[in-house]
Every structure is written in C-alpha cells, then in structure tokens.
Image (cartoon, rainbow, N blue to C red):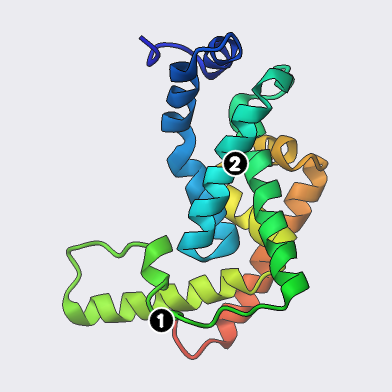
Amino acid sequence: MYRDLADEQLVELAISEDPDAFGEIVRRWERKIFALCFGMLTREDEARDAAQETFIAAYRNIGRFRGEAKVSSWLHRIAVNQCLTVKRRHKTRSEEYLDDEAGEGDRIFVAPARLSPGNKAEQAERLNVVRQAVSALPVDLRQVVVMKEFEEMTFQEISETLEIPLSTVKSRLYTALKQLRLRLERSPVEVV
C-alpha cells in the first residue's frame, strides 16, 4: 500500500496518525541516514545511535514539516544536526576514541570479492588511508564530502540540507578534495 506513495504523501498520512506510514519513511531512508551518520562520526555505534535519534526527532516533529524542502533533505538536516551534537558532546568531554582503529576501514569502503588475498590486503590498506584522510577533515568539510561522494547528493540537495548557499557547498567540496589530495600524496601507501 505505502510503496507507491511519495515521501510527502507518507508524511501527510503520518501526521494524520498512521504510524505505518512513518515506518515506511524509516524503511526507505534508514540506510542512507546511517551511512551519512557513519561518514560523519566514523564509529558504527555512534552512527547507529545518531540515525535512531534522527528518526525519533523526525517522528516527534512530523507535524512541523511544511513541505518547503524534500523529505530526504529534511531527514538529512536532522541527521547532520544529530551528528554535530555528538561531536560537541565529545569535544566538551575531551574523549578520544582510539580503539578498533584497524578494523573500521572496511566498514565504509568494500573491496570487490574477486580480489586475491594479496590484492585484498593492499586494497584494505588503501581504503584505511582514505578513511583516515576523510576522518581527519574538519566536520564542515567532511559532511560535504560524505554527502556528495558517498551519499551521491546533488549540490542543491546539500545546500538545502545544510541550509548554506550553493557556492559555499562547492567551495567546501573543492577545499576538502584539495586537502584530501594533499594528505593522500603524503601517504606512504599509493592510493590510485
């Protein structure tokens, strides 16, 4: 029943107290929202929590959705805010997470299964270097890279989601890619 409806129609049904309609919104967007959170936070447990908080906040505020932006942009904006809140909390507590550094690289980037064990090891090392380089970017640059390169959002969608001018999105992406290139050029591992 819900699969043929547009996101905006599902929101209307959810506002009229149809919980299954909101469940369909969650089903459609949970993977992308998790991927965005993981790209920004780099820890699976934190990303899972931020994604869950995103949908809780969306559900609580569904009546305030006015349709001025797409549902996807609205959800992405809530997710970005959740991730920024997590980052602020960590900053105020001065917590550093250094555990499990080695095994996280393959969670973001997946190597093709056809690679030999030697190629897989090289690929894993390259992916870890790229992951570390992306993680080292300032949050405002990292979120644009994640949204554009991994979420495949358009510049306009990123602009609407982050509520910043289109020119700022392009400038941040250019700056982020330039910083990534410099970091990767200095890496002892060749990233092709």
> Crowding at label 2, few (<14), some or many (≥20) Cα neighbours within 10 Å?
many
| Residue 41 in sight in this render | yes
142 w.r.t. 99: above or below: above
Q: Position of residue 94 (x, y in %)?
A: 72, 78
On the rendered structure, is 116 left or right of 51?
A: left
To which quarter of the image does residue 71 belong? top right
Q: In which quarter of the image is the C terminus?
A: bottom left
Q: Residue 102: which disc?
A: 1
**58 w.r.t. 11: above or below:** below
Which amino acid, by three-letter code, is at mark 1?
Ala
Which SS class for mark 1? loop
In this rendering, the label closer to the viewer, 2 or 1: 2
Q: Which of 97 and 133 is in front in this view?
A: 97
Distance from label 2 to label 1 (Cα)? 28 Å
Residue 13 picture location, percent across and down: 54, 10
Where is residue 42 shown, x and y percent of the image? 53, 65
93 left or right of 128 in image: right
Callout 1 crowding tier (Cα within 10 Å): few <14, some 14–19, many ≥20: few
Number of the label disc, if any, that sits on residue 54: 2
